[in-house]
Amino acid sequence: MKECNSLEAVRHEIDLLDEKIVELIAARNAYIHQAVKFKQSVAEVKADARVKDVLERVRHKALALGLSPNLITDLYKMMINEMVESEIAEFRNRGSL
């Protein structure tokens, strides 16, 4: 992380990070859509055990980085829920093709 000398510089760096974060979320979402090809049921799409593992992993990472684990867990829950719903729709549409 670089040292900024003004509020504008800080905001610029934040904006750059926001762009990268959105790009990473889009990449994660693309992998989610690849994963649906390998699943045989809605229960597999929901993958409750996998979701639990992901939430535990990101929670520990947040703690290690000095971030609020609740913030990270809440963000991931929201992201995962949206991606799972999209994946379920794709799974069901696949069956009707």
Image (tube, rainbow, N blue to C red):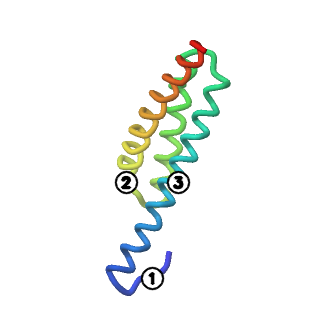
Please state which amino acid type lies under the numbered disc 2: Ser
Please tell me which residue lies in front, 59 or 32. 32
Most extreme residue toward the top is 96
Left or right, residue 70 beside residue 22: left
Label 1 – label 2 distance at C-alpha: 23 Å
Please state which amino acid type lies under the numbered disc 3: Glu
Mark 3 highlights which residue? Answer: 23
Indicate the secondary structure of the residue bearing disc 1.
Answer: loop
Q: Quadrant of residue 78?
A: top left
Label 1 – label 3 distance at C-alpha: 24 Å
Mark 1 highlights which residue? Answer: 3
Q: What is the x, y in percent for residue 71?
A: 36, 49
Circle nearer the N terminus (1, 3): 1
Residue at 51% from the left image edge and 60% from the top image edge:
20
Q: What is the x, y in percent for residue 84?
A: 48, 29
Q: What label does residue 68 carry, if any?
A: 2
Please state which amino acid type lies under the numbered disc 1: Glu
Circle nearer the N terminus (2, 3): 3
Quadrant where the C terminus sits is top right
Residue at 54% from the left image edge and 18% from the top image edge:
93
Q: Marks 1 and 3: CB-CB under 8 Å?
A: no
**How many labels were placed on the picture?**
3
- Which mark is nearer the camera, 1 or 3? 3
Residues packed near mark 2 inside 10 Å, few (<14), some (14 to 19) or many (20 plus)? few
